[in-house]
């Protein structure tokens, strides 16, 4: 089957490459000429484990190509996937202008029956909006070509997107057309050989499923971060509490890890979009608003801890702070809504100097803080720690798990370690000579 994927971001590029890996012929289209030219040269615009190898292999086998032309490729395609960005507007609602633009471009080049698939995360009702957009464009052209619009939301985790796509937990197909549903099942048949993971429903329910899933996961994170703050105040240890509640099979351990808040391209944007949708239909989304508020507050927490720690140690102004990890999560270079951004802003405002290290995300981070005199970009965690008064862990990259802390401690000026991911054992960090401050657990300080 010939598949056209419009958009070559995380969702579009991963989806297109995985479709090609499963034997389909795939054309990935983007209006960004520079990005397409780089992809043709084998230069991948994002860091995602396994993606570069997947793209290069399928390009070599002629199953995956890249283009900027709608006119040449829409008529050839059996199915057109729309996988373009849907950023937040200032009021938090979802901006669907790129979806509309893609739908119009497809409509102008249709010559026969097509299935148009919304892969982007879009508000409830977007399938109907896309269908209306295409019908109106056809009317302007004086033509009437049959088509169906399908909702097929993605559930990819950055850092594990390739595996999530190749071995999905579930495949949601929202369609009101039996014909389109059968074609979608055929497209995904190679992904479901071991057992059927396909769930079919109407388009409205499929669109809502995406938002509801992200909202539930974000709720668990914010819930646990709020529990962590209560634990801190009463003297309990949130790490032990997490074990106690996670062992309940009705709850489970996933997304119960306290930390510095969630970021990335999905949870913050989707929570705000769902809040906006709820208000538009007269529903007061009290739980969702609380989830968002807790997350905003949580991103400020570690900087506040650092400021309080240094308040009786000469103040934080002029202090050198090593930051380990900048991306919003490990195994990605994505800096969108990363907790590190809030931490850096607060530290700079307080007059601190930051020594920053991330295994992958430094090029993207530099774009957000160009040529700042109080920022030093480092090549590894030891360089970042050299001369530092404190270390702050913000992203739990695997290479930070088994650090040789002896040289780290010897090269530091101070002894503070702020663990924004509760990655280390407090007793171990105390034995290594650190003042250890984490999330939702008692501080472990060296004897004064």
Image: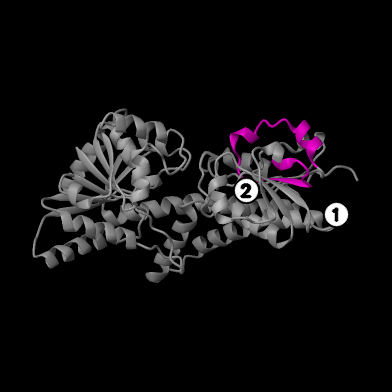
Q: Residue at (62%, 48%) from the top-left corner?
A: 259
Which numbered dot is residue 313?
1
209 vs 106, nearest the viewer: 106
Q: Is residue 404 magenta?
A: yes
Question: Circle 2: is it few (<14), some (14-19), or many (20+) Cα within 10 Å?
Answer: many
Name the secondary structure under disc 2: loop
In the image: residue 12, left or right of residue 127:
right
Name the secondary structure under disc 1: loop
Q: Is residue 126 visible in this depiction of the protein?
A: no
* Magenta span: 384-412
Q: Residue at (46%, 54%) from the top-left corner?
A: 215
**Number of numbered labels in the structure image:** 2
CB within 8 Å, label 1 to label 2: no
Which numbered dot is residue 259?
2
Q: Residue at (63%, 40%) from the top-left corner?
A: 244
Q: Is residue 350 visible in this depiction of the protein?
A: yes
* Distance between the alpha carbons at the discs numbered 1 and 2: 25 Å
The single residue placed furthest to the right in the displayed view is 448
Q: In the rendering, at what x and y percent does residue 131 appear?
A: 21, 60
Q: In the rendering, at what x and y percent does residue 50 appear?
A: 43, 33
Q: In the rendering, at what x and y percent does residue 367 appear?
A: 54, 53
């Amino acid at each position: 089957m010939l598949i056209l994927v419009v958009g070559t971001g995380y969702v579009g590029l991963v989806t297109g490459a995985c479709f090609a890996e499963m034997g389909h012929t795939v054309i990935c289209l983007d209006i960004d000429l520079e990005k397409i030219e780089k992809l043709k040269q084998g230069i991948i615009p994002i860091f995602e484990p396994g993606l570069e190898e997947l793209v290069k292999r399928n390009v070599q086998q002629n199953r995956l190509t890249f283009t900027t032309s709608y006119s040449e490729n829409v008529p050839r395609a059996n199915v057109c996937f729309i996988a373009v960005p849907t950023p937040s507007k200032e009021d938090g609602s979802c901006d669907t202008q790129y979806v509309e633009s893609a739908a119009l471009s497809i409509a102008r080049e249709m010559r026969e029956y097509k299935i148009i698939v919304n892969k982007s995360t879009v508000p409830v009702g977007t399938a109907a909006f896309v269908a209306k957009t295409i019908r109106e464009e056809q009317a302007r052209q004086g033509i009437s070509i049959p088509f169906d619009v399908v909702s097929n939301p993605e559930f990819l985790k950055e850092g594990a997107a390739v595996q999530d796509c190749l071995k999905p937990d579930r495949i949601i197909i929202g369609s009101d057309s039996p014909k389109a549903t059968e074609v979608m099942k055929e497209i995904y048949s190679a992904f479901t050989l071991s057992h059927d993971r396909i769930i079919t429903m109407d388009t409205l329910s499929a669109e809502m499923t995406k938002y509801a899933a992200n909202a539930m996961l974000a709720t668990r994170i914010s819930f646990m971060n709020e529990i962590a703050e209560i634990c801190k105040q009463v003297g309990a240890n949130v790490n032990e509490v997490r074990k106690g509640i996670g062992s309940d099979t009705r709850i489970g351990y996933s997304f119960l890890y306290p930390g510095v808040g969630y970021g990335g391209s999905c949870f913050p944007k989707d929570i705000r979009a769902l809040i906006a949708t709820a208000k538009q239909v007269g529903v007061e989304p009290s739980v969702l608003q609380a989830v968002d508020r807790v997350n905003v507050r949580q991103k400020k927490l570690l900087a506040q801890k650092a400021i309080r720690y240094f308040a009786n140690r000469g103040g934080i102004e002029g202090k050198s702070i090593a930051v380990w990890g900048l991306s919003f999560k490990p195994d990605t270079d994505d800096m969108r809504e990363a907790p590190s951004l809030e931490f850096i802003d607060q530290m700079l405002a307080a007059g601190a100097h930051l020594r920053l290290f991330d295994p992958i995300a430094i090029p993207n981070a530099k774009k957000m803080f160009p040529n700042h005199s109080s920022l030093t970009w480092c090549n590894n965690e030891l360089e970042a720690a050299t001369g530092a008064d404190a270390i702050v862990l913000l992203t739990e990259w695997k290479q930070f798990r088994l650090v040789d802390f002896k040289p780290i401690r010897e090269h530091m000026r101070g002894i503070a370690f702020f663990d924004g991911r509760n990655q280390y054992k407090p007793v171990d960090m105390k034995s290594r000579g650190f003042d250890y401050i984490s999330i939702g657990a008692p501080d472990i300080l060296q004897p004064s």
